[in-house]
Image (cartoon, rainbow, N blue to C red):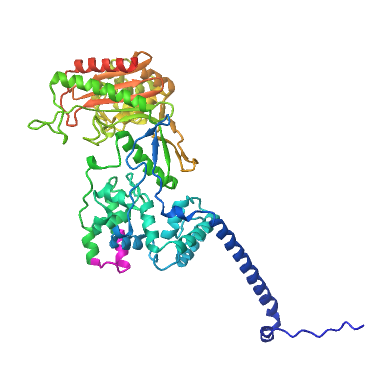
Amino acid sequence: MSTWRPISPLPFWKRWLPECLHGTVDFIIYASVTGGVLLAGVAFFYFMLAMRFDLGEIAKLPAGTAYYDREGTEIAAPGSAGRRLVKRADIPDFLVKALQAREDARFFEHSGVDVRGMLRATVRNIKDRDFTQGASTLTMQLARNTFKIKEKSLHRKFLEIALTLRVEARYSKDEILTSYLNRIYFGAGADGVEQAARVYFGKATRDLTEGECALIVGIIRGPHIFSPFRNLEAALEQRRQTLNRMVAMGFVDQARCDTLAAEPVKLVAEELRETQTSYALQAVRREFDRLLEEGNIQLGGLKVYTTLDARWQLRLENELNHAVEDLEKEKSWKHPTPNGLVVGEEPAYLQYAAITTETKTGATLALIGGRNYTQSRFDRTRSSRDLGSAFEPFVAAAAAERGKLVLPGQPVQTGRQIGPAEVERIAKRCGIAGPFLATEDLFRGSVAATPLEMSIGLATLGNQGKRPKPYLIREIRDSSGEVVYTAKPQLTQVIGSDAAKDASSVLRRTNGTRCFTGATGSERDAWTLRLGPGGATAIWIGFDKPTVIAPAQRIKSLLDEFIKRLDNE
């Protein structure tokens, strides 16, 4: 039986190519088909993965951020339960053009994924050998923020692309743009563009000027570092960059750009800002803004657990109020009117500031920046005031560190053993920034410091010479309860443990604590230092405009009573 079969004719393209290229072409064809099948399989996989997400979340109002004290009790905060929504009709067209120019030039052209931009970013990432460029469109950012896609990996990027395509298929460009502006964070506790407009400018989004629109958009890339409340110069530079991009895209001409860039910024006065309710929460917000950027934390139902001890803070506030009210009765001082002034008289409103730092960790247990937050939002824990004899523990620390004798109650004699330069060096290591005098007056306390610096310095003495780095937020959890940030206490050994113990000995011992009470020689500033078993408290009392408070002996007597009440409760 014959097994002969006719030879199949070659495909037409092989007849036109040299035989030496046939194998190469075969390989290319098979590789292309295989690659196409694999690509289709990958696309199908990520399409099915993206189907698990509920796109209805895009248009929902995100949950606000909740704040808690160290015991888990919620701290009331404006806007914590939600945020104001803005409709597309209320968003100025100029703001839309500014956003397009700065964040996504081809937003109204692409289908959610800017292929050209992605190719450019891919080339850059290959060069950098890292995910330094993302080429994220507004839709991609919206999908990432809504569904909390955080990690930088190829898997997450493919999932983000699949979700983006689904979002674009379901929502219009205007709906995507509006949801984006309602969802993102603008710093200073402002969630969404409507709250940002009210927080920064005291008006609704629809009433923003063109210059204000450009500034608002400029904040987006760095809500903390570009907040005009924190760094107006940086915010103005971002406004200028946004306007320059608008010129490049033909949205405005150069003359209009220059006019808007020169427009004065009228920010809401500090006492009228609506995103804070206390000095402590104000400080928590500052730290929260920084952590959001550093940790790439996405907003939406976050739970922020602070280090604050609400009960201890309330005790401090109550006893401080009691103390200054006693002084005011003696001096017949009058309480100010709501604008802070007594009609027809010079203002005479005794203020105070207090801060307690946990010695072992640096956690802030209490923070009181002034007597009445609604009347003045200036945080006095960050304001330098003269120390006087309250500086003695750091003179003692310097002497003890050098192996010299510590003479309690004799800071000049103690300091003379080592000189001003050595006292300055050790004080700086303990957290006192200065400036310092280069004379013996330094030993007498001719130096200024903030209550925060004094609290940290005191904690250093109470923690065997280890200076703690202060912090207010110990943990952040997302809406699902997953921990997205945990504080790590940072301690730096700055002086020896024996020197720290000797320095603490100049403080008076009372009821298991070490303390100092007294006024400066000018009687314009009064200090209380309290080193307890777990916390170091620094308290300042005085006037914003330096004025004699009362005779030094009366101040000391009053502060001694204050300490006694505080310790006996």
**On screen, residue 478 above or below 451:** below
Q: Nearer the viewer, residue 416 or 311?
A: 311
**Residue at x 18%, y 22% (from the top left corner):** 523
- Let me know if residue 519 appears in the view: no
For the record, the magenta segment spans 241-254
Position of 42 compared to 475: left or right?
right
- Let me know if residue 158 appears in the view: yes
- Give x and y (percent) for residue 569: 34, 16
Position of 125 compared to 291: left or right?
right
Magenta stretch: residue 244 in it? yes
**On screen, residue 458 above or below 165:** above
**On screen, residue 20 above or below 563:** below
The quadrant of the picture occupied by the N terminus is bottom right
- Give x and y (percent) for residue 341: 13, 33
Magenta stretch: residue 348 in it? no
Report the predominant secondary structure element of the magenta stretch: helix
